[in-house]
Amino acid sequence: MGFSNELAALNQQLAGRGCKARIEQRKNSLTLRATLPPKPGALTLSSELRSRTFAWSGWQPSEASPIKEKELVTRTVFEEVAQRLHSEKYANAPERGAEAWRKRWATALNKLPTQGKLTMERLLAVIEDLPPATSVRRETGLIWGMVARKLGMDPAPLRVC
């Protein structure tokens, strides 16, 4: 059975399972073709454009109010902010972003204390326990610093470690 026959059989299996996607061969690569639902907000945007009521103010991301260090910043909150920040940073390069998440971001986030409130003192204590002058310590400080800034904390102490 040739490759094109196997591909046709695979597409028939997908169709038989009710999957509205198919795999196509284009020269030396395979592509996935599917009709996907619109992105959230796409219909609203189209409606605003048609009715000439579009305004940038309704579409620009708003900065979340900074979290003061006195407020509760848990590992969960810190990780959620890190995930949003990572998504924004790598929105135009998802493959590069996936590799960066696996190699750098997840490694740094796994070092966060698991219990209690995350204060600057606790974060610094963890970083100071890492071997000095290593890439792990530097990367952890950089990533935690970016997240800390998003949370309204001063990132400078984390980045000099």
Image (spheres, helix red, strand yellow):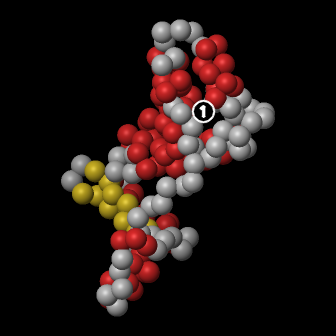
Residue drawn where x is 45% and y is 41% of the image:
98
- Left or right of 80: which side holds 70? right
Q: Position of residue 5 (x, y in %)?
A: 35, 60
Residue drawn where x is 24% and y is 57% of the image:
26
- Left or right of 139: which side holds 51? left
**Residue underneath mark 1:** 109
Quadrant position of the N terminus in the picture: bottom left
Say which element carries label 1: helix
Q: Amino acid at mark 1?
A: Leu
**Res. 92 in view:** yes
Which quadrant of the structure image shows residue 7?
bottom left
Which quadrant of the structure image shows residue 33?
bottom left
Q: Position of residue 83 (x, y in %)?
A: 54, 46
Note whether 41 is above or below 155 in the view shown.
below
- Left or right of 31: which side holds 77? right
Q: Nearer the viewer, residue 47 or 62?
A: 62
Q: Nearer the viewer, residue 62 or 113?
A: 62
Residue drawn where x is 34% and y is 90% of the image:
51
**Res. 76 in view:** no
Residue drawn where x is 32% and y is 61% of the image:
24
* Residue placed furthest toward the top: 132
Which quadrant of the structure image shows residue 44?
bottom left
Q: Callout 1 environment at 10 Å: few (<14), some (14 to 19), or many (20+)?
A: some
Q: Position of residue 36 (x, y in %)?
A: 44, 71
* Residue placed furthest toward the bottom: 51
Q: Position of residue 158 (x, y in %)?
A: 53, 25
* Residue placed furthest toward the right: 115
Q: Nearer the viewer, residue 5 or 103?
A: 103
Note whether 81 is above or below 114 in the view shown.
below
